[in-house]
Amino acid sequence: MQYRRLGHAGLRLSALSLGSWVTYHNQVDVKSAAEMMAAAYDAGVNFFDNAEVYAGGRSEEIMGAALAQLGWPRLNYVVSSKYFWGLDRAGEAVNRKDTLNRKYLMQVVDGSLKRLGLDHLDLIYCHRADPATPIDETVRAMNDLIVQGKALYWGTSEWSADEIRAAWMVADRHGWHRPVVEQPQYHLFHRKRVEQEYARLYEDIGLGLTTWSPLASGLLTGKYRAGVPAGSRGAMDSMAFLRDGLTDAAKNAAVAQLEPIAAELGGSVAQLAIAWAASNPRVSSVITGASRLAQLHDNLGALALLEKMTPEVKAHIEALTGHLAA
């Protein structure tokens, strides 16, 4: 396993990490979560990603129960959670959803800590930007959570470059803890934000990246080339919004063309896609997901292809996919 600094911060993360979005509670129970987390940990994974909103809080509960069973030394692993959407989606608690105001942020982390069974989180993210709350208010709340010892580092997820820079400048001006990480979507068909929009931020403010969806929600596995198979992520009612993208004819044709490249390197298209994302030196960790142990082992197999991501191989991949990237 490779370990990389989180931007300019001292924290080191495994190049591949394990996330719980979609799978925990919906497809994975405590027993399966513990089994897969143990296998990931044995392979060198030290970063486990979560969010308050995943499965309405059940994802954090499942991960917390798994951590309790595994009993690892707390210094040996990194756990994150993310905040914005809230849990009270259908209720009238207006300060508990779609916000980054101080009231929400200063209380919401307590719920995550209880569900995860931890006394602090290593990373906390603002899951989306909140134009209705002054940026100073949000940044100060995130700083105060770190000062209180509830979190060690903070960052953003799916914020624009301008929003990230504004938050960093507010923190820097006041001497508060600055955001150190962004968690964007990044895969062969979704690249411009990471490769272009954020380009100045890596050197200017030392931004680190923990990227999600390296397989484009399964498109880059090749399993959607003949439609949406039963039992897949695309077949889930809660994931209906993904279906048009998963069955895109041009992208599926490109995936088919990637197969001989992957085979020549000794891996699958999925492993090729994960290795490609991890080969970007700006990426601190690629968050993978799995609904079963065999899938986890397959994802971890991408590490063997990572060292084979030569400029020539990446140029070949670029020629097949670059014109389809957003």
Image (cartoon, rainbow, N blue to C red):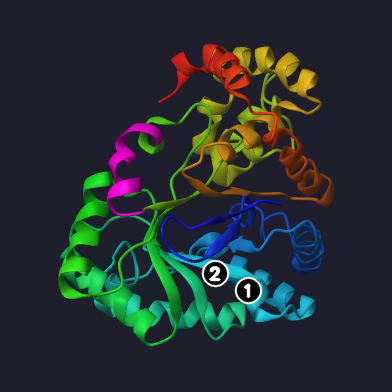
Q: Which residue is mark 1?
A: 61
The x and y percentages for residue 54 are: 54, 60
Residue 240 seen in the figure:
yes
281 displayed left or right of 141: right
Vertical order, 132 against 57 (above or below): above
Rendered location of residue 63, percent (x, y)? 66, 70
Q: Is residue 39 above or below residue 238?
A: below
Front-most of 89 and 98? 98
Left or right side of 131 for 306? right
Where is residue 70 drawn, in percent x and y? 78, 76
Q: Mark 2 near mark 1, Cβ–Cβ under 8 Å? A: yes
Disc 2 to disc 1, C-alpha distance: 7 Å
Q: Which quadrant of the figure has residue 314?
A: top right
- In the image, the segment drawn in magenta is 195-206
Which residue in the protein does label 2 denote? 57
- Residue 102, picture quadrant: bottom left
Residue drawn at (15%, 69%) of the image:
173
Q: Amino acid at mark 1?
A: Glu
Whether 90 is among the magenta residues is no
Q: Is residue 196 magenta?
A: yes
